[in-house]
Image (tube, rainbow, N blue to C red):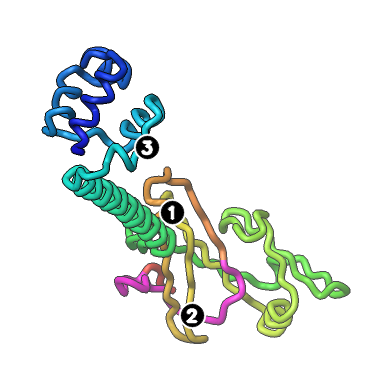
Amino acid sequence: MELGKTLIEIRKQNSLTQEDMAERFHVTRQTISNWENGKSFPDLETLICISDAFHISLDIMLKGDKEMVREMTKEQVKGRTQKQRIVITALVAIVAVLGVLYVLHNTSTPLKPEDYTVTVKEITLEDVSVDKNRRTATYIIGDAGIDTTSGKDVYVFNGEEYNSLMTRGRAFAVTVTTDKRFDSWSLEGVPGEPLSVELARRNANLLKRNLPSRQTSIQLEAFDKIYDLNTGEVMWKK
């Protein structure tokens, strides 16, 4: 028996009008009419509600209505496909966002030479307080800059730096000053050759406000100039 005929029989056996059925299952009277005429079919959830309400098994309701079964199967497949597409789209979006965050966090943009200045000061033994017992030498940085590693305005020579300072009798304080935010800097070179300097700002911090920043590197070999690593522009010359 087709589902439409079954629904008509159920309704009449229970002395219900189409309006009564519509109100009971929260649909319109026209929807009930379409179900009974085979123009459309109830969804599976509604069929279960009808089955429970009138104590009729789904097997009996669907028996012989191959078209109904085919339509329900198509709807189920369509629903699963849509859910799969939503899940895949969401996963792709999450991966894309994580990828962007990873790139921003792990890449940097070098500061331009005009964004900072470099100054150099020669430090002699007269500029430091030597503690021979502890084998340390303390230099008050003052206007030369701030040692951002320790967060203090002094620099302490110890270990190999102390030995080098005491042997050579001098060291060099290289100060980079800028009003731009930067997250890393490097000063590299071969003893006796020009040094290269690079300041970089992590791309994840591009939107953060600028803060005045100064960093000081003390123990260096002799050099006659410092140039920007990216542009080759000379930042300081003896």
* Residue in the foreground of this view, choosing between 132 and 32: 32
Image label count: 3
Where is residue 39? Give x, y as percent.
11, 33
Residue pointed to by mark 1:
178
Determine the secondary structure under disc 1.
strand
Give the structural element (helix, strand or loop) at label 3: loop
Distance of label 2 from label 3 (alpha carbons): 94 Å
For label 3, the crowd category at 10 Å Cα-Cα, with few meaning under 14, some 14 to 19 and many 20 or more, is few
- The amino acid pointed to by label 3 is Ser
Q: Position of residue 44 (x, y in %)?
A: 31, 38
Choose the circle earlier in sequence order: 1 or 3: 3
Q: Position of residue 14 (x, y in %)?
A: 31, 17
Q: CA distance from mark 1 to mark 2?
A: 22 Å
Residue 186 visible in the shown view: yes
Residue wearing tag 2: 223
- The amino acid at mark 1 is Thr
Percent x, y for residue 168?
A: 66, 83
Nearer to us in this view, 164 or 122: 164
- For mark 3, what is the residue? 57
Image quarter in which the N terminus is found: top left
Q: Give yes or no for residue 221 being in the magenta stretch.
A: yes
Which quadrant of the figure contains the C terminus?
bottom left
Could you tell whether 46 is left or right of 66 in the image? right
Image point (62%, 70%), residue name? 123
Residue at position x 18%, y 38% in the image: 2
**Label 2: how many Cα within 10 Å (few below 14, some 14–19, many 20+):** some
Residue type at numbered disc 2? Phe
Question: What stretch of residues is rendered in magenta?
Answer: 217-234
Residue 90 counted in the magenta span:
no
